[in-house]
Image: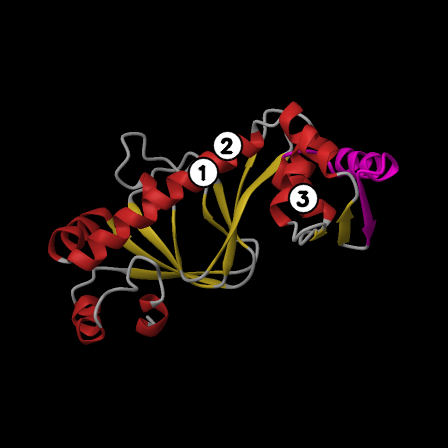
């Protein structure tokens, strides 16, 4: 395992340099490799270990009630995967985790994580901070997904990306539709309507806010 890559993981970043080799020696772990499209975890699978994505990137996705793929987020290495669920009473993966490219994952059994939390203060602190931040992220993501209309989702997304009046849609329409949990044709139609209504203008992926008040109203009306 690449100890330098592991040291950049949020959970391990504050372990002193002189302690890293000892930390690794005491670590009970195994590494797994996945090709692009490989499933690292399936929704509903029990979280028995701490997964740390050491190389590559993955997407966390699930199917909505309408059968549309919902892209929860994209995670790049080095980062933990579903660490907040390891000690949960209902410790199941809430999503499918799929490799977007060739990826390497370090798997640390739950009992080994317990020993690390008890013996390494730096690891304990960062574990708590990271999972608290994840809770905030998930609550914001849930708030976003609870927005009922596609236009409301688009407006919220554009406002979050905007620098004054300018913004860039940094995903393809297919990826954006998965992120919103809607179909691509529905997303394209809503985007076209916002352009025709002079709320925004688009030139490729770059856009400009024309009617800021109307954009904010779309978010509030949901």
Residue most toward the bottom?
18
Q: Is residue 188 magenta?
A: yes
Structural distance between the alpha carbons of marks 3 and 2: 17 Å
46 to 208, vertically: above or below: above
* Residue neighbourhood size for the residue with mark 2, other residues' Cα within 10 Å, grouped as few (<14), some (14–19), many (≥20): few
Mark 3 residue element: helix
What residue is drawn where x is 27% and y is 50%?
127
x and y, in percent, of residue 129 in the image: 30, 49
x and y, in percent, of residue 128 in the image: 26, 47
Q: Quadrant of the C terminus?
A: top right
Q: Which residues are magenta?
A: 181-203
CB atoms of marks 3 and 1 within 8 Å? no
Q: Quadrant of the N terminus?
A: bottom left
User: Which image quadrant for residue 133?
Assistant: top left
x and y, in percent, of residue 9 in the image: 35, 62
Mark 2 residue element: helix
CB atoms of marks 3 and 2 within 8 Å? no
Where is mark 2, residue-wise? 142
Q: Which mark is residue 138?
A: 1
Where is mark 3, residue-wise? 158
Q: Nearer the viewer, residue 134 or 64?
A: 134
């Amino acid at each position: 395992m690449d100890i330098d890559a592991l040291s950049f993981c949020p959970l391990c970043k504050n372990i002193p340099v002189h302690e890293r080799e000892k930390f690794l020696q005491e670590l009970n772990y195994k590494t797994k490799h996945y090709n692009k499209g490989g499933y690292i975890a399936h929704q509903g699978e029990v979280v028995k270990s701490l997964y740390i994505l050491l190389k590559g990137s993955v997407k966390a996705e699930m199917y909505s009630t309408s059968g549309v793929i919902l892209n929860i987020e994209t995670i790049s290495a080095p980062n933990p995967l579903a660490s907040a669920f390891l000690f949960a009473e209902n410790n199941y993966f809430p999503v499918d985790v799929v490799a977007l490219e060739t990826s390497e994952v370090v798997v640390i059994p739950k009992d080994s994580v317990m020993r690390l939390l008890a013996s390494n203060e730096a690891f304990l602190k960062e574990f708590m901070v990271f999972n608290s931040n994840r809770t905030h992220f998930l609550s914001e993501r849930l708030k976003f997904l609870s927005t009922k209309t596609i236009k409301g989702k688009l407006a919220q997304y554009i406002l979050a990306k905007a620098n004054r009046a300018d913004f860039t849609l940094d995903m393809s329409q297919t990826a954006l539709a998965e992120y919103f949990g809607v179909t691509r044709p529905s997303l394209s139609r809503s985007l076209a309507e916002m352009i025709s209504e002079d709320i925004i203008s688009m030139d490729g992926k770059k856009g400009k806010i024309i009617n800021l008040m109307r954009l904010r109203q779309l978010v509030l009306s949901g």
